[in-house]
Protein backbone atom coordinates (compact mmCIF):
# COMPACT_ATOMS: atom_id res chain seq x y z
CA UNK A 1 0.00 0.00 0.00
CA UNK A 2 1.43 3.39 -1.02
CA UNK A 3 2.19 5.88 1.69
CA UNK A 4 0.09 9.07 1.86
CA UNK A 5 1.81 12.16 0.46
CA UNK A 6 2.37 13.67 3.93
CA UNK A 7 3.93 10.44 5.19
CA UNK A 8 6.17 10.17 2.12
CA UNK A 9 7.37 13.75 2.67
CA UNK A 10 8.12 13.00 6.31
CA UNK A 11 10.09 9.85 5.42
CA UNK A 12 12.00 11.63 2.65
CA UNK A 13 13.03 14.49 4.92
CA UNK A 14 14.13 12.11 7.67
CA UNK A 15 16.03 9.86 5.28
CA UNK A 16 17.90 12.71 3.59
CA UNK A 17 18.85 14.28 6.90
CA UNK A 18 19.95 10.92 8.26
CA UNK A 19 22.12 10.16 5.22
CA UNK A 20 23.68 13.62 5.25
CA UNK A 21 24.51 13.42 8.96
CA UNK A 22 26.05 9.97 8.56
CA UNK A 23 27.85 10.21 5.21
CA UNK A 24 28.68 13.84 4.47
CA UNK A 25 30.91 14.84 7.43
CA UNK A 26 33.08 11.78 6.86
CA UNK A 27 33.44 12.31 3.09
CA UNK A 28 34.11 15.98 3.77
CA UNK A 29 36.96 15.05 6.11
CA UNK A 30 38.41 12.55 3.63
CA UNK A 31 38.47 15.15 0.87
CA UNK A 32 40.17 17.68 3.14
CA UNK A 33 42.91 15.10 3.73
CA UNK A 34 43.20 14.42 -0.02
CA UNK A 35 43.26 18.05 -1.04
CA UNK A 36 45.81 19.08 1.58
CA UNK A 37 48.13 16.34 0.25
CA UNK A 38 47.54 17.66 -3.26
CA UNK A 39 48.23 21.37 -2.65
CA UNK A 40 50.67 21.43 0.26
CA UNK A 41 53.52 21.47 -2.24
CA UNK A 42 52.45 25.06 -3.03
CA UNK A 43 53.32 26.07 0.54
CA UNK A 44 56.37 23.79 0.72
CA UNK A 45 57.63 25.54 -2.41
CA UNK A 46 58.15 28.74 -0.42
CA UNK A 47 61.20 27.03 1.14
CA UNK A 48 61.84 23.99 -1.05
CA UNK A 49 62.66 25.88 -4.24
CA UNK A 50 65.45 27.77 -2.47
CA UNK A 51 66.77 24.78 -0.52
CA UNK A 52 66.94 22.50 -3.56
CA UNK A 53 67.72 25.17 -6.18
CA UNK A 54 64.57 24.56 -8.24
CA UNK A 55 63.64 27.13 -10.92
CA UNK A 56 60.03 28.23 -11.38
CA UNK A 57 59.78 25.94 -14.41
CA UNK A 58 61.01 22.91 -12.43
CA UNK A 59 58.60 23.64 -9.60
CA UNK A 60 55.68 24.19 -12.00
CA UNK A 61 56.42 20.98 -13.90
CA UNK A 62 56.76 18.96 -10.71
CA UNK A 63 53.56 20.42 -9.26
CA UNK A 64 51.62 19.71 -12.42
CA UNK A 65 52.95 16.23 -13.24
CA UNK A 66 50.78 14.95 -10.40
CA UNK A 67 47.85 15.23 -12.81
CA UNK A 68 49.54 13.24 -15.58
CA UNK A 69 49.70 10.30 -13.19
CA UNK A 70 46.17 11.10 -12.07
CA UNK A 71 44.81 10.48 -15.58
CA UNK A 72 45.86 6.83 -15.65
CA UNK A 73 43.52 5.34 -13.05
CA UNK A 74 40.59 7.76 -12.97
CA UNK A 75 38.16 5.56 -14.95
CA UNK A 76 39.11 2.24 -13.26
CA UNK A 77 38.83 3.91 -9.85
CA UNK A 78 35.27 5.11 -10.45
CA UNK A 79 34.19 1.78 -11.93
CA UNK A 80 35.67 -0.09 -8.94
CA UNK A 81 33.45 1.91 -6.61
CA UNK A 82 30.39 1.13 -8.75
CA UNK A 83 31.11 -2.55 -9.44
CA UNK A 84 33.15 -3.68 -6.41
CA UNK A 85 33.04 -1.74 -3.15
CA UNK A 86 33.32 1.95 -2.33
CA UNK A 87 34.52 1.19 1.16
CA UNK A 88 37.33 -1.10 0.04
CA UNK A 89 38.39 0.91 -3.02
CA UNK A 90 38.55 4.26 -1.18
CA UNK A 91 40.32 2.74 1.85
CA UNK A 92 43.00 1.02 -0.27
CA UNK A 93 43.58 4.19 -2.26
CA UNK A 94 44.09 6.27 0.87
CA UNK A 95 46.53 3.84 2.46
CA UNK A 96 48.80 3.83 -0.58
CA UNK A 97 48.70 7.55 -1.37
CA UNK A 98 49.34 8.48 2.27
CA UNK A 99 52.62 6.55 2.19
CA UNK A 100 53.64 8.21 -1.09
CA UNK A 101 52.69 11.70 0.15
CA UNK A 102 54.82 11.37 3.28
CA UNK A 103 57.76 9.97 1.30
CA UNK A 104 57.84 13.15 -0.81
CA UNK A 105 59.37 14.89 2.20
CA UNK A 106 62.65 13.02 1.58
CA UNK A 107 63.38 14.18 -1.99
CA UNK A 108 66.64 15.94 -2.93
CA UNK A 109 66.63 16.31 -6.74
CA UNK A 110 64.28 17.43 -9.49
CA UNK A 111 63.86 13.90 -10.94
CA UNK A 112 62.92 12.63 -7.46
CA UNK A 113 60.42 15.49 -7.15
CA UNK A 114 58.88 14.59 -10.51
CA UNK A 115 58.74 10.86 -9.67
CA UNK A 116 57.05 11.32 -6.29
CA UNK A 117 54.49 13.80 -7.60
CA UNK A 118 53.70 11.50 -10.53
CA UNK A 119 53.33 8.53 -8.14
CA UNK A 120 51.05 10.56 -5.87
CA UNK A 121 48.80 11.28 -8.85
CA UNK A 122 48.64 7.61 -9.83
CA UNK A 123 47.80 6.45 -6.31
CA UNK A 124 45.17 9.14 -5.69
CA UNK A 125 43.54 8.90 -9.13
CA UNK A 126 40.53 6.78 -8.19
CA UNK A 127 39.65 8.69 -5.03
CA UNK A 128 37.70 11.71 -6.29
CA UNK A 129 35.72 10.04 -9.11
CA UNK A 130 35.01 7.22 -6.66
CA UNK A 131 33.51 9.65 -4.16
CA UNK A 132 31.40 11.40 -6.81
CA UNK A 133 30.11 7.99 -7.91
CA UNK A 134 29.49 7.04 -4.28
CA UNK A 135 27.33 10.15 -3.73
CA UNK A 136 25.10 8.88 -6.54
CA UNK A 137 24.36 5.82 -4.39
CA UNK A 138 22.91 7.97 -1.61
CA UNK A 139 21.44 11.15 -3.18
CA UNK A 140 18.68 11.63 -5.74
CA UNK A 141 19.54 13.62 -8.89
CA UNK A 142 17.58 16.65 -7.65
CA UNK A 143 19.68 16.71 -4.45
CA UNK A 144 23.09 16.07 -5.96
CA UNK A 145 24.37 19.59 -6.71
CA UNK A 146 23.96 20.53 -3.07
CA UNK A 147 25.47 17.21 -1.96
CA UNK A 148 28.47 17.63 -4.26
CA UNK A 149 28.93 21.22 -3.10
CA UNK A 150 28.82 20.22 0.58
CA UNK A 151 31.44 17.57 -0.11
CA UNK A 152 33.58 19.80 -2.35
CA UNK A 153 33.42 22.69 0.11
CA UNK A 154 36.29 20.69 1.56
CA UNK A 155 38.47 22.27 -1.15
CA UNK A 156 38.35 25.85 0.17
CA UNK A 157 38.21 24.59 3.77
CA UNK A 158 41.34 22.51 3.19
CA UNK A 159 43.12 25.56 1.79
CA UNK A 160 42.06 27.53 4.84
CA UNK A 161 43.36 24.80 7.16
CA UNK A 162 46.52 24.15 5.15
CA UNK A 163 47.66 27.76 5.23
CA UNK A 164 48.18 28.28 8.99
CA UNK A 165 49.19 24.63 9.51
CA UNK A 166 51.81 24.92 6.79
CA UNK A 167 53.02 28.23 8.20
CA UNK A 168 53.54 26.54 11.58
CA UNK A 169 55.24 23.41 10.23
CA UNK A 170 57.63 25.34 8.01
CA UNK A 171 59.09 26.98 11.10
CA UNK A 172 60.10 23.56 12.46
CA UNK A 173 63.65 22.19 12.19
CA UNK A 174 63.30 18.87 14.01
CA UNK A 175 65.94 16.14 13.74
CA UNK A 176 67.91 18.28 11.32
CA UNK A 177 65.14 18.32 8.70
CA UNK A 178 63.84 21.57 7.18
CA UNK A 179 60.28 22.72 7.87
CA UNK A 180 59.03 22.02 4.34
CA UNK A 181 60.08 18.38 4.74
CA UNK A 182 58.09 18.01 7.96
CA UNK A 183 55.15 19.68 6.23
CA UNK A 184 55.05 16.96 3.56
CA UNK A 185 55.86 14.07 5.91
CA UNK A 186 53.25 14.88 8.57
CA UNK A 187 50.45 15.95 6.24
CA UNK A 188 50.58 12.56 4.49
CA UNK A 189 50.01 10.59 7.70
CA UNK A 190 46.23 11.25 8.12
CA UNK A 191 45.52 9.48 4.81
CA UNK A 192 46.98 6.26 6.19
CA UNK A 193 45.01 6.51 9.44
CA UNK A 194 41.71 7.32 7.75
CA UNK A 195 42.22 4.62 5.15
CA UNK A 196 41.75 2.14 7.99
CA UNK A 197 38.81 4.11 9.44
CA UNK A 198 37.10 4.19 6.02
CA UNK A 199 37.21 0.40 5.80
CA UNK A 200 35.35 0.19 9.09
CA UNK A 201 32.93 3.13 8.75
CA UNK A 202 31.52 3.44 5.22
CA UNK A 203 28.49 1.54 3.91
CA UNK A 204 28.49 0.75 0.19
CA UNK A 205 24.75 0.91 -0.62
CA UNK A 206 21.47 1.91 1.05
CA UNK A 207 20.25 -1.70 1.28
CA UNK A 208 23.27 -2.44 3.52
CA UNK A 209 22.63 0.55 5.81
CA UNK A 210 21.60 -1.00 9.10
CA UNK A 211 21.90 2.49 10.59
CA UNK A 212 18.86 3.64 8.55
CA UNK A 213 15.35 2.85 9.91
CA UNK A 214 13.49 0.39 7.63
CA UNK A 215 11.02 2.95 6.24
CA UNK A 216 13.80 5.40 5.37
CA UNK A 217 15.92 2.65 3.81
CA UNK A 218 13.00 1.45 1.68
CA UNK A 219 12.19 4.99 0.52
CA UNK A 220 15.82 5.73 -0.40
CA UNK A 221 16.29 2.45 -2.29
CA UNK A 222 13.11 3.15 -4.25
CA UNK A 223 14.17 6.71 -5.12
CA UNK A 224 17.66 5.72 -6.29
CA UNK A 225 16.26 2.83 -8.36
CA UNK A 226 13.66 5.13 -9.93
CA UNK A 227 16.33 7.70 -10.79
CA UNK A 228 18.49 5.01 -12.37
CA UNK A 229 15.54 3.74 -14.42
CA UNK A 230 14.67 7.27 -15.56
CA UNK A 231 18.28 8.03 -16.52
CA UNK A 232 18.50 4.99 -18.78
CA UNK A 233 14.90 5.03 -20.12
CA UNK A 234 14.91 4.94 -23.89
CA UNK A 235 18.69 5.19 -24.13
CA UNK A 236 20.50 2.15 -22.74
CA UNK A 237 24.10 3.19 -23.21
CA UNK A 238 27.15 0.90 -23.21
CA UNK A 239 30.31 2.20 -21.57
CA UNK A 240 32.19 2.98 -24.78
CA UNK A 241 29.28 4.95 -26.19
CA UNK A 242 28.91 6.84 -22.91
CA UNK A 243 32.58 7.84 -23.00
CA UNK A 244 32.09 9.25 -26.52
CA UNK A 245 28.81 10.99 -25.67
CA UNK A 246 28.76 14.61 -26.83
CA UNK A 247 27.83 15.99 -23.42
CA UNK A 248 30.42 13.86 -21.62
CA UNK A 249 33.12 15.29 -23.90
CA UNK A 250 31.86 18.81 -23.24
CA UNK A 251 31.99 18.16 -19.50
CA UNK A 252 35.58 16.97 -19.95
CA UNK A 253 36.34 20.32 -21.56
CA UNK A 254 34.49 22.22 -18.84
CA UNK A 255 36.42 20.46 -16.11
CA UNK A 256 39.74 20.81 -17.96
CA UNK A 257 39.38 24.58 -18.31
CA UNK A 258 38.31 24.89 -14.69
CA UNK A 259 41.29 22.96 -13.36
CA UNK A 260 43.68 25.13 -15.37
CA UNK A 261 42.44 28.02 -13.25
CA UNK A 262 41.83 26.10 -10.04
CA UNK A 263 45.21 24.44 -9.66
CA UNK A 264 47.13 27.19 -11.38
CA UNK A 265 45.80 29.60 -8.78
CA UNK A 266 45.83 27.11 -5.90
CA UNK A 267 49.46 26.02 -6.31
CA UNK A 268 50.93 29.40 -7.26
CA UNK A 269 48.87 31.80 -5.13
CA UNK A 270 51.24 31.72 -2.11
CA UNK A 271 54.33 32.38 -4.26
CA UNK A 272 52.56 35.07 -6.32
CA UNK A 273 51.44 36.89 -3.16
CA UNK A 274 54.85 36.61 -1.54
CA UNK A 275 56.68 38.11 -4.52
CA UNK A 276 54.04 40.78 -5.05
CA UNK A 277 54.32 42.17 -1.52
CA UNK A 278 57.73 40.85 -0.39
CA UNK A 279 55.90 39.21 2.50
CA UNK A 280 57.19 36.82 5.13
CA UNK A 281 56.38 33.13 4.73
CA UNK A 282 54.08 33.18 7.75
CA UNK A 283 52.10 36.22 6.59
CA UNK A 284 51.91 34.86 3.04
CA UNK A 285 50.45 31.58 4.27
CA UNK A 286 47.81 33.33 6.38
CA UNK A 287 46.73 35.73 3.61
CA UNK A 288 46.49 32.78 1.20
CA UNK A 289 43.65 31.37 3.33
CA UNK A 290 41.34 34.36 2.79
CA UNK A 291 40.12 33.56 -0.78
CA UNK A 292 39.36 29.96 0.18
CA UNK A 293 37.50 30.95 3.34
CA UNK A 294 35.25 33.44 1.53
CA UNK A 295 34.44 30.93 -1.22
CA UNK A 296 32.80 28.37 1.11
CA UNK A 297 29.40 30.12 1.54
CA UNK A 298 29.43 31.23 -2.11
CA UNK A 299 29.91 27.63 -3.23
CA UNK A 300 27.10 26.31 -1.04
CA UNK A 301 24.71 29.10 -2.05
CA UNK A 302 25.28 28.44 -5.77
CA UNK A 303 24.60 24.73 -5.39
CA UNK A 304 21.50 25.34 -3.27
CA UNK A 305 20.09 27.66 -5.95
CA UNK A 306 20.95 25.17 -8.72
CA UNK A 307 19.05 22.37 -6.92
CA UNK A 308 16.15 24.69 -6.15
CA UNK A 309 15.72 25.77 -9.77
CA UNK A 310 16.82 22.51 -11.40
CA UNK A 311 19.14 24.51 -13.71
CA UNK A 312 22.75 23.28 -14.11
CA UNK A 313 24.47 24.75 -17.18
CA UNK A 314 24.39 28.47 -16.38
CA UNK A 315 25.13 27.79 -12.71
CA UNK A 316 28.32 26.09 -13.91
CA UNK A 317 29.24 28.61 -16.63
CA UNK A 318 28.63 32.08 -15.20
CA UNK A 319 30.84 31.72 -12.08
CA UNK A 320 33.73 30.54 -14.27
CA UNK A 321 33.40 33.60 -16.50
CA UNK A 322 33.32 35.90 -13.47
CA UNK A 323 36.52 34.25 -12.23
CA UNK A 324 38.10 34.79 -15.66
CA UNK A 325 37.21 38.50 -15.60
CA UNK A 326 38.81 38.91 -12.15
CA UNK A 327 42.06 37.29 -13.27
CA UNK A 328 42.07 39.30 -16.52
CA UNK A 329 41.85 42.48 -14.43
CA UNK A 330 44.83 41.27 -12.41
CA UNK A 331 46.83 40.59 -15.59
CA UNK A 332 46.05 44.03 -17.04
CA UNK A 333 46.68 46.17 -13.97
CA UNK A 334 49.71 46.41 -11.71
CA UNK A 335 48.02 45.61 -8.40
CA UNK A 336 49.22 45.86 -4.84
CA UNK A 337 48.58 43.14 -2.29
CA UNK A 338 45.10 44.42 -1.19
CA UNK A 339 43.65 44.63 -4.71
CA UNK A 340 45.33 41.39 -5.77
CA UNK A 341 43.85 39.62 -2.75
CA UNK A 342 40.34 40.90 -3.64
CA UNK A 343 40.71 39.69 -7.23
CA UNK A 344 42.13 36.34 -6.13
CA UNK A 345 39.13 35.99 -3.81
CA UNK A 346 36.61 36.73 -6.59
CA UNK A 347 38.38 34.27 -8.87
CA UNK A 348 38.44 31.55 -6.21
CA UNK A 349 34.73 32.06 -5.47
CA UNK A 350 33.88 31.79 -9.17
CA UNK A 351 35.91 28.63 -9.65
CA UNK A 352 34.46 26.92 -6.59
CA UNK A 353 30.82 27.99 -7.09
CA UNK A 354 30.40 26.02 -10.31
CA UNK A 355 31.53 22.61 -9.07
CA UNK A 356 28.24 21.46 -7.53
CA UNK A 357 26.23 22.04 -10.71
CA UNK A 358 28.97 20.65 -12.95
CA UNK A 359 29.24 17.34 -11.12
CA UNK A 360 25.46 16.93 -10.83
CA UNK A 361 25.20 16.68 -14.63
CA UNK A 362 26.61 13.23 -15.58
CA UNK A 363 24.39 11.19 -13.24
CA UNK A 364 21.31 13.04 -14.49
CA UNK A 365 21.47 11.65 -18.03
CA UNK A 366 23.51 8.43 -17.71
CA UNK A 367 22.87 5.12 -15.97
CA UNK A 368 24.97 3.98 -13.01
CA UNK A 369 27.78 2.08 -14.76
CA UNK A 370 27.99 4.54 -17.68
CA UNK A 371 27.94 7.50 -15.27
CA UNK A 372 30.73 5.99 -13.15
CA UNK A 373 33.00 5.49 -16.17
CA UNK A 374 32.12 8.94 -17.53
CA UNK A 375 32.83 10.60 -14.19
CA UNK A 376 36.20 8.87 -14.18
CA UNK A 377 36.95 10.12 -17.69
CA UNK A 378 35.77 13.67 -16.98
CA UNK A 379 37.91 13.75 -13.86
CA UNK A 380 40.96 12.18 -15.54
CA UNK A 381 40.91 14.28 -18.70
CA UNK A 382 39.84 17.40 -16.86
CA UNK A 383 42.69 17.14 -14.42
CA UNK A 384 45.19 17.46 -17.26
CA UNK A 385 44.35 21.12 -16.74
CA UNK A 386 45.89 20.69 -13.32
CA UNK A 387 49.16 19.96 -15.10
CA UNK A 388 48.80 22.67 -17.75
CA UNK A 389 47.93 25.52 -15.36
CA UNK A 390 50.79 25.19 -12.82
CA UNK A 391 53.37 24.28 -15.48
CA UNK A 392 52.54 27.16 -17.84
CA UNK A 393 52.60 29.69 -15.00
CA UNK A 394 56.12 28.49 -14.11
CA UNK A 395 57.15 28.38 -17.79
CA UNK A 396 56.07 31.97 -18.45
CA UNK A 397 57.60 33.18 -15.18
CA UNK A 398 60.94 31.55 -16.04
CA UNK A 399 61.09 33.25 -19.43
CA UNK A 400 59.53 36.64 -18.73
CA UNK A 401 60.17 37.17 -15.02
CA UNK A 402 56.44 37.86 -14.52
CA UNK A 403 53.23 35.94 -13.85
CA UNK A 404 51.07 37.77 -16.41
CA UNK A 405 51.47 35.14 -19.16
CA UNK A 406 50.42 32.39 -16.78
CA UNK A 407 47.50 34.50 -15.56
CA UNK A 408 46.21 34.86 -19.13
CA UNK A 409 46.45 31.07 -19.45
CA UNK A 410 44.11 30.73 -16.46
CA UNK A 411 41.74 33.32 -17.96
CA UNK A 412 41.54 31.37 -21.23
CA UNK A 413 40.93 28.12 -19.38
CA UNK A 414 38.09 29.56 -17.31
CA UNK A 415 36.29 31.09 -20.29
CA UNK A 416 36.65 27.81 -22.19
CA UNK A 417 35.24 25.96 -19.16
CA UNK A 418 32.14 28.16 -19.06
CA UNK A 419 31.57 27.82 -22.81
CA UNK A 420 31.71 24.01 -22.66
CA UNK A 421 29.34 23.91 -19.68
CA UNK A 422 26.70 26.07 -21.33
CA UNK A 423 26.77 23.94 -24.50
CA UNK A 424 25.82 20.75 -22.65
CA UNK A 425 22.38 19.50 -23.76
CA UNK A 426 20.57 17.94 -20.83
CA UNK A 427 17.25 17.80 -19.07
CA UNK A 428 16.78 20.05 -16.09
CA UNK A 429 16.77 18.17 -12.80
CA UNK A 430 13.30 17.50 -11.43
CA UNK A 431 12.56 19.62 -8.38
Image: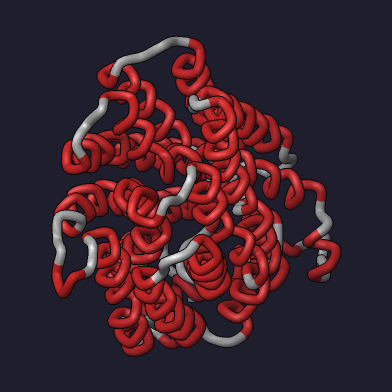
Depth check: give the residue in front, 404 or 298.
Answer: 404
Q: Residue 407: where, in percent of width, then height?
A: 53, 27
Q: Quadrant of residue 420?
A: top right
Q: Residue at x 60, y 75 (%)?
A: 77
Q: Residue at x 50, y 65 (%)?
A: 117
In the depicted structure, whether residue 26 falls above or below residue 91: above
In the depicted structure, whether residue 375 falls above or below residue 409: below
The answer to whether residue 368 is left or right of residue 34 is right
Q: Is residue 11 visible?
A: no
Q: Residue 188: where, in percent of width, then height?
A: 33, 72
Q: Is residue 183 visible?
A: yes
Q: Residue 309: where, in percent of width, then height?
A: 50, 36
In the depicted structure, whether residue 324 falls above or below residue 79: above
Q: Quadrant of residue 81?
A: bottom right
Q: Quadrant of residue 31?
A: bottom left
Farthest top residue? 333
Q: Residue 384: where, in percent of width, then height?
A: 64, 52
Depth check: give the residue in front, 14 or 271.
Answer: 271
The answer to whether residue 244 is left or right of residue 128 is right
Q: Residue at x 73, y 52 (%)?
A: 248
Image coloring type: secondary structure
In the depicted structure, whether residue 251 falls above or below residue 379: above
The answer to whether residue 314 is left or right of residue 147 is right
Q: Residue at x 14, y 61 (%)?
A: 172
Amino acid sequence: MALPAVARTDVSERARRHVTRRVMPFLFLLYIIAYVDRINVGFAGLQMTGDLGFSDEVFGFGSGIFFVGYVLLGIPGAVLVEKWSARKAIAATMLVWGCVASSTGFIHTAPQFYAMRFALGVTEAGFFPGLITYLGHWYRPQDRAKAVAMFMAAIPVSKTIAAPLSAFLMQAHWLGLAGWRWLLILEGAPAVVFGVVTWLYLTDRPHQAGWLPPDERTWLMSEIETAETRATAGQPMPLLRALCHRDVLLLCGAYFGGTVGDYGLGLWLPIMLQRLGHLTIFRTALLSAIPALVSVPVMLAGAWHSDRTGERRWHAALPRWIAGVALAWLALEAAGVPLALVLFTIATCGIMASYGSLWAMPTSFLGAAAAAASIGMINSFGNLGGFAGPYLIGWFSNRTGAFSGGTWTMVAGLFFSGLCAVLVRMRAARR
